[in-house]
Image (cartoon, rainbow, N blue to C red):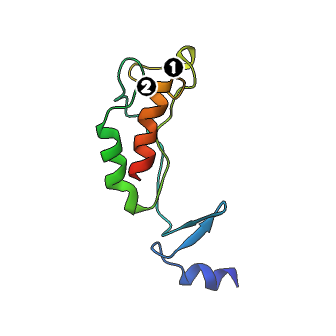
């Protein structure tokens, strides 16, 4: 039964979610850290930040703006220029 299955599950058990096999049931929610440059490029230490947390479980990165007009706060990361996209590639490679 579903009650028995739920009672026997652990936070640290593997789980399949949305077609992904995850190492556990832990997820890091997206946050807004406002640590990008004024041009919306994430800093080099962003890759280190997420790399340090990658073993915890599923990571959902911070919100990123899709256009200059769509930015709602200062130092918000973007994903609409080549420079921004290249910086996010370093983050993705790190995790």
Q: Badge 1 is on which residue? A: 71
Q: Is residue 15 above or below residue 65?
A: below
For marks 2 and 1, give the CA distance.
7 Å
Where residue 76 sits in the image (x, y, percent)? 43, 25
- In screen coordinates, is 19 left or right of 85? right
Residue sitting at x 41%, y 34%: 87
Q: Residue furthest right?
A: 1
Name the foreground residue: 25 vs 92.
Answer: 92
Residue underneath mark 2: 76
Query: Mark 2, residues whose alpha carbon is within 10 Å: few (<14), some, or many (≥20)?
Result: many
Residue beneath the point at 45% across and 61% down: 57
Name the image quarter holding the N terminus: bottom right
Extreme-top residue of the structure: 69
Q: Where residue 68 sits in the image (x, y, percent)? A: 53, 16
Instruction: Tell me: residue 63, above or below residue 69.
Output: below
Count of marks overlaid on the render: 2
In the image: residue 2, left or right of residue 86 = right
Secondary structure category for the residue under label 2: loop
Placement of 29 over or under 25, stated as above or below: above
Describe the element under mark 1 as helix, strand or loop.
Answer: loop
Rendering coords of residue 59 (x, y %): 47, 52
Circles 2, 1 touching at the beta carbon (< 8 Å): yes
Q: Residues within 10 Å of mark 1 (few under 14, many from 20)?
A: some
| Residue at x-position 30% and y-position 46% | 48
């Amino acid at each position: 039964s579903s009650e028995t299955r739920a009672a026997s599950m652990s936070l640290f058990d593997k789980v399949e979610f949305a077609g992904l096999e995850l190492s556990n049931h832990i997820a890091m929610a997206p946050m807004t850290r406002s640590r990008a440059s004024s041009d919306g490029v994430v800093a080099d230490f962003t890759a280190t930040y997420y790399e340090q947390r990658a073993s915890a479980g599923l990571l959902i990165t911070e919100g990123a703006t899709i256009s200059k007009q769509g930015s709602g706060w200062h130092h918000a990361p973007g994903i609409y220029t080549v420079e921004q996209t290249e910086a996010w590639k370093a983050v993705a490679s790190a995790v």
